[in-house]
Amino acid sequence: MTKPENLDRLVRQIRACTLCSPYLEPRPVLHVSKTAKLCIASQAPGLKVHQTGISFNDASGDRLRAWLGVTREQFYDESKIALAAMAFCFPGYDENGHDLPPRRECAATWRARLFAALPQFETILLVGSYAQAWHLGDARKSNMTETVRAWREYAPRYIPMPHPSWRNTAWLKKNPWFADELLPYLRRRVRRLLAD
């Protein structure tokens, strides 16, 4: 069995990565530690995150923190919560002004190595379909809505969620079970993980 890489060294390598430089300005953003019990696996940083170097430092982050029932201070405590997107750099915009998908070469190069070096998280929040596809593989359902609806099948190890973007406001209105059923469980789970 191969020994996992040194996490600190690997994080330095990721933060120095220029793999996507032919396509965009690299600025890898991640927040991890050897002690976190909860990981938030999302898709890719947005422009504000790219500019500040702080994950979920935008309106999506405000909504996500409300979903979790945590303060900014708790959310950014790397000793308790890890933040590791599918791609670490802002992928840019498409012709309609929407964020492009996470660049595939990022996950292909870094994700398995990073998760081998990280602690065995008690819970990983799978924010969006890209994280759900990578972490759940064939166990995911036919689409993001059905995967999130089946959250009890994956919990407590994995909790699939929609992205907290304002673009998903209509989704949230169409799927009230998310706020009524999943969010209370999520908040209890997060409270327990942060208390340990």
Image: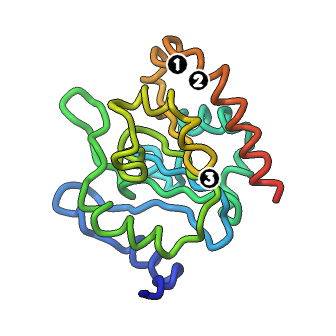
Q: Which residue is mark 2?
A: 178
- The part of the image, by quadrant, that contains residue 146 is top left
Above or below, 177 against 32 in this view is above
- Sequence-first tag of 3 and 1: 3
**Residue tagged by mark 3?**
123
Image location (x, y in percent) of residue 16: 37, 74
The kind of residue on which mark 3 rests is Thr
Q: Badge 3 local density, few (<14 within 10 Å), some, or many (20+)?
A: many
- What type is the residue that disc 2 sits on? Phe
Q: In the rendered view, would you say 153 is above or below 50?
A: above
Q: Which of 178/95 is in front?
A: 178
Label 1 secondary element: helix
Relative horizontal placement of residue 43, taking residue 103 as reference (left or right): right
Q: Quadrant of the C terminus?
A: bottom right
The image quarter in which residue 101 lies: top left
Closest to the camera, between mark 3 and mark 1, is: 3
Residue at the farthest top position: 174
